[in-house]
């Protein structure tokens, strides 16, 4: 009691440090890092548009010309975030800079960037065949996810490395598109739906749970009934209904997974707030006359956020699975690549197309595993009995 | 000699280095004798006890040197064994049968899923396998009667949660004594108990020792308890026993400077220098009473907590935590509120600051009724009334720096023009409570318990209040740190003309610091008056019982 306790500077950083000291969490982090890089740089890794073309003495890059605003935003945000991570400033200012940069980049990209409406992938192959270019630099995987290669005949499903024209490392799908390319582009959906849906769920859960825990009494009782109502909603069937009525939209999916998934977070936060509001430092904050938002979000929340981190990493995994399930059932996105939709193709065929099952299935498995590994490591790091 | 510890070293291997918990301790214990091991927290006294009974986890603890020679009576013979080199099988025969232990926390040291009887009988049957269950049961009832447990035969079949803290400690003693051990190690057995219960338990232990002839190694941080219990006292400091001797000699004529400092830090021995000035101020305060209105006036304040039962949460009863308290506190005085745990004194402190809403009654501060003021209108009073808490760990937000903690309330109350100015004021506050300005950028975990308590005081002072509730501010602190904090409070009172409501269960602290004392018992004030008068000529029966129970160092002299 009379000796200062030596410890980490910051509880939050301490938890992360302890979590990522574990082998499991490191493996998970590497896997997610790979998926993240694939998602951010997808158009540069897999694209039918050549990186650089020299045609009639003119050097230009069709790939850059055809980048969508989203592609540009993701890359820019990535290059803002990475140095920000290593900058020595407070976490809160880092977070604010990140939010501001993201908004700016998104608005800017959508205002200033307008790629050509019409894309004809065949033109490059035809011109290459006709020797129209002096030289061409292709992307590492020279196929776009929606490049169905109709110029090469109705190829359909082709096993890995079996195609005569062009080598498809992981084969092609029903429509003749390259599987590897589609998988790389699909990682965007997997990550996006995981983060956005979990983010929505966390925000609602923290606000509702915090109010329930702090005020208790009537607020708590009404809140808990609300939680029970939302826990009774079967997410998958609600998603099916919405898809049937409002068409297939990724954003609707994210929102529905988010607003049906917050009840767990609310329960965690409620329990933490119930415990923490009795703590002396919270009483002292009230006695000093601090405003309610400061008591709730400055004095209580940072001390009770740890269990949420654990739930969130499992939540991301289950959101990815929900999207995959929906796509597998054929109710996901129509044309955009998604791992679940590719799995669907594996069974909707007279023959068993193993490459359509193994590769996307493996990707889903590894991503979900990675999040579970991280979730478990964070849970152990938060548990005071294991430290 | 029953037990002879020589040059004992106990090292604990942690991730970031080795802690020398016990560092060359020598101690001996005769048959039928009580030795009190006295020391401040972290001095290694519990580690020494756990080394003797070998309860330390072996994979992280080692004994680089030392012998613990114990006279082992078994099968009619006496064998002198070194406990450190004994095999685990032999140790099992000694542990519980020849050496027993009582722990500090009675709430957690009994297993909640077994009845009291089952737990006592288990230990007995383990060490005396040849007796029948019925015999063991009869014997257990007998031991429970010896520890003066009312309705012993019925209590046998009850689960621990139905017993009070004092009763649980009696059960622990019964469990420890059932095999008639030669040595009983008691690790702070009364620290978690109220002072009247403590007095009963100490009396019980003494009488049991007289009948059984057990030797007791009694660990405590409280010199008063040691003076009452011990034949000899050993003082422990930084893993070493720096001084040992007859109780009277240690208390009256300590040789080592550390022991002297420790005894001088006891509230009854603290220099009354500041107090002399205070008495002058008191007289003024007392005389002014007729002319001045009280700063704080409580008028029949009640705080009831509803007891709800059943499906519809119907209120069936109330716990009357505070049951009609009338109290007036005048400017510049220190009023002590004394009582045992659960008497409602902390609830009253919280209710005054409106941290808990009063069920009925009126709270007047500076002539204004603040009982039902809205949040916004209460704001100006929040500035003037503050609180300091008991637990130095939970009273500071672990996620904020000291600077943020001190300046945020200032900003809310528009004290100081700019952030820089507020930081400057915070630095001044820290130096006022005896810390350095460069501590501002640190986090709470970087400070010791006493320093944290100073920060808690600085936070209370940040708004420059007139009135501060001190809720058991020194209870979690070592006696030397307690002395520093008490003197700091008195000094701040002088400098800032503070009015304090000092809540405590410790009579000697109250005698030292307060001008007037209010005694609280079961939610009611039973006695109120000048501290000296209350402590000398108590009128109420409960006050007299409370005062009698206080273990005093002077009792040994």
Image (cartoon, helix red, strand yellow):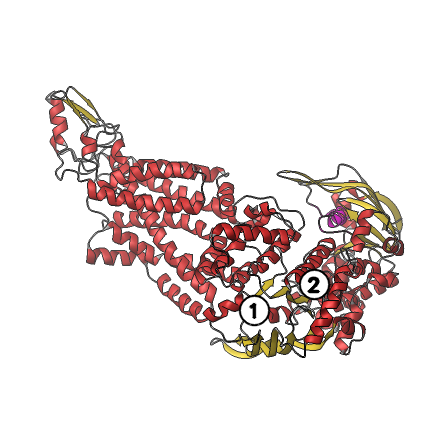
Which numbered disc covers residue A35?
none
In depth, the one of B22 and A74 nearer the eye is: A74
The stretch in magenta equals B39-56
- Label 2 vs label 1: CA separation? 47 Å
Compared across the picture, whether B437 is left or right of B255 comes to left
The location of residue B210, given as percent across then percent down, is 88, 62
In depth, the one of A179 and B418 nearer the eye is: B418
Compared across the picture, whether A133 is left or right of B484 comes to left
> Residue B154's quadrant in the figure?
bottom right
- Report the residue at 57% width, 55% height from top: B396
How many numbered callouts? Answer: 2
Q: Secondary structure at mark 2?
A: helix
- Are discs 2 and 1 less than 8 Å apart at CB? no
The mark that comes first in sequence, 2 or 1, is 2
* In magenta stretch: residue B53: yes
Which numbered disc covers residue B118?
2
The location of residue A307, given as percent across then percent down, is 47, 52
- Report the residue at 56% width, 66% height from top: B384
Residue under numbered circle 1: B353
The location of residue B488, given as percent across then percent down, is 68, 57
Label 1 resides on the chain identified as: B
Q: Could one spot residue B62 in this view of the protein?
A: yes
């Amino acid at each position: 009691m009379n000796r200062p306790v030596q410890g980490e500077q910051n509880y939050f950083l301490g938890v992360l440090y302890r979590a990522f000291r574990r082998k499991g969490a490191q493996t998970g982090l590497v896997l997610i890092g790979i998926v993240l890089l694939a998602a951010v740089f997808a158009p540069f890794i897999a694209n039918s548009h050549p990186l650089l073309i020299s045609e009639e003495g003119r050097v230009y890059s069709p790939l850059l010309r055809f980048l969508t605003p989203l592609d540009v935003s993701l890359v820019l945000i990535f290059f803002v975030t990475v140095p920000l991570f290593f900058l020595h400033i407070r976490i809160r200012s880092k977070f604010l800079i990140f939010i501001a940069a993201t908004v700016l980049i998104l608005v800017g990209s959508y205002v200033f960037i307008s790629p050509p409406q019409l894309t004809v992938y065949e033109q490059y192959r035809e011109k290459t065949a006709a020797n129209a270019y002096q030289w061409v630099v292709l992307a590492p995987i020279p196929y776009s996810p929606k490049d169905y290669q109709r110029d090469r005949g109705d190829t359909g499903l082709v096993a890995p490395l079996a195609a005569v024209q062009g080598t498809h490392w992981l084969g092609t799908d029903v429509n003749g598109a390259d599987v590897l390319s589609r998988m790389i582009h699909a990682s965007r959906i997997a990550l996006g739906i995981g983060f956005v849906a979990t983010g929505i769920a966390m925000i609602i859960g923290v606000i509702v749970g915090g109010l329930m825990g702090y005020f208790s009494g009537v607020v708590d009782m009404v809140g808990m009934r609300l939680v029970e109502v939302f826990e009774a909603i079967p997410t998958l069937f609600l998603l099916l209904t919405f898809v049937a009525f409002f068409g297939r939209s990724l954003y609707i999916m994210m929102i529905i997974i988010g607003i049906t998934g917050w009840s767990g977070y609310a329960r965690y936060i409620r329990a933490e707030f119930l415990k923490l509001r009795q703590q002396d430092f919270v009483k002292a904050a009230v006695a000093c006359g601090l405003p309610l938002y400061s008591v709730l979000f400055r004095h209580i929340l940072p001390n009770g956020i740890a269990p949420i981190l654990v739930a969130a990493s499992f939540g991301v995994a289950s959101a990815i699975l929900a999207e995959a399930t929906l796509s597998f059932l054929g109710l996901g996105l129509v044309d955009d690549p998604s791992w679940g939709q590719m799995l669907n193709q594996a069974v909707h065929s007279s023959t068993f197309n193993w490459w359509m099952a193994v590769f996307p299935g493996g990707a889903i498995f590894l991503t979900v595993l990675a999040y579970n590994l991280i979730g478990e490591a964070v849970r152990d790091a938060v548990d005071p009995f294991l430290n | 000699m029953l037990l002879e510890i020589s040059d004992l070293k106990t090292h604990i291997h942690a991730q970031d280095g080795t802690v020398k918990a016990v560092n060359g301790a020598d101690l001996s214990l005769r048959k039928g004798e009580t030795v009190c091991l006295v020391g401040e927290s972290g001095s290694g006294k519990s580690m020494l006890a756990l080394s003797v009974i070998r309860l330390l986890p072996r994979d992280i603890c080692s004994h680089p040197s030392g012998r613990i020679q114990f006279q082992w009576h078994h099968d009619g013979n006496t064998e002198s064994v070194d406990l450190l080199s004994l095999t685990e099988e032999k140790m099992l025969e000694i542990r519980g049968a020849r050496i027993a232990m009582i722990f500090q926390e009675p709430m957690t040291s009994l297993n909640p899923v077994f009845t009291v009887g089952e737990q006592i009988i288990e230990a007995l049957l383990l060490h005396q396998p040849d007796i029948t269950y019925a015999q063991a049961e009869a014997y257990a009832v007998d031991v429970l009667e010896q520890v003066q447990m009312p309705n012993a035969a019925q209590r046998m079949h009850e689960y621990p949660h139905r017993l009070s803290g004092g009763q649980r400690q009696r059960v622990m003693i019964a469990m420890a004594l059932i095999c008639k051990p030669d040595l009983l190690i008691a690790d702070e057995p009364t620290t978690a108990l109220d002072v009247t219960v403590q007095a009963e338990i100490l009396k019980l232990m003494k009488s049991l020792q007289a009948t059984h002839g057990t030797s007791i190694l009694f660990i405590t941080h409280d010199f008063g308890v040691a003076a009452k219990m011990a034949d000899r006292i050993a003082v422990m400091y930084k893993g070493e026993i720096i001084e040992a001797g007859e109780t009277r000699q240690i208390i009256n004529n300590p040789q080592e400077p550390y022991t002297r400092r420790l005894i001088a830090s006891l509230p009854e021995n603290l220099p009354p220098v500041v107090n002399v000035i205070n008495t002058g101020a008191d007289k003024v305060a007392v005389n002014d009473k007729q002319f001045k209105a009280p700063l704080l006036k409580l008028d029949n304040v009640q705080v009831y907590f509803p007891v709800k039962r059943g499906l519809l949460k119907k209120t069936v009863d109330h716990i009357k935590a505070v049951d009609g308290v009338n109290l007036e506190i005048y400017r510049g005085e220190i009023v002590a509120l004394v009582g045992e745990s659960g008497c409602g004194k902390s609830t009253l402190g919280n209710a005054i600051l409106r941290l808990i809403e009063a069920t009925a009654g009126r709270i007047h501060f500076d002539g204004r009724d603040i009982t039902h003021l809205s949040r916004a209108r209460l704001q100006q009073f929040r500035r003037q009334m503050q609180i300091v808490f008991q637990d130095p760990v939970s009273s500071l937000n672990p996620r904020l720096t000291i600077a943020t903690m001190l300046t945020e309330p200032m900003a809310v109350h528009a004290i100081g023009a700019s952030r820089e100015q507020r930081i400057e004021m915070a630095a001044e506050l820290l130096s006022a409570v005896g810390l350095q300005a460069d501590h501002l950028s640190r986090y709470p975990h970087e400070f010791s318990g006493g320093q944290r308590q100073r920060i808690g005081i600085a936070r209370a002072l940040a708004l420059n209040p007139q009135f501060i509730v001190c809720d058991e501010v020194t209870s979690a602190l070592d006696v030397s740190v307690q002395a520093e904090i008490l003197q700091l409070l008195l000094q701040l009172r002088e400098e800032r003309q503070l009015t304090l409501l000092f809540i405590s269960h410790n009579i000697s602290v109250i005698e030292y610091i307060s001008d007037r004392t209010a005694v609280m018992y079961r939610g009611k004030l039973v006695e109120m008056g000048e501290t000296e008068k209350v402590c000398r000529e108590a009128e109420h029966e409960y006050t007299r019982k409370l005062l009698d129970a206080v273990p005093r160092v002077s009792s040994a002299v």
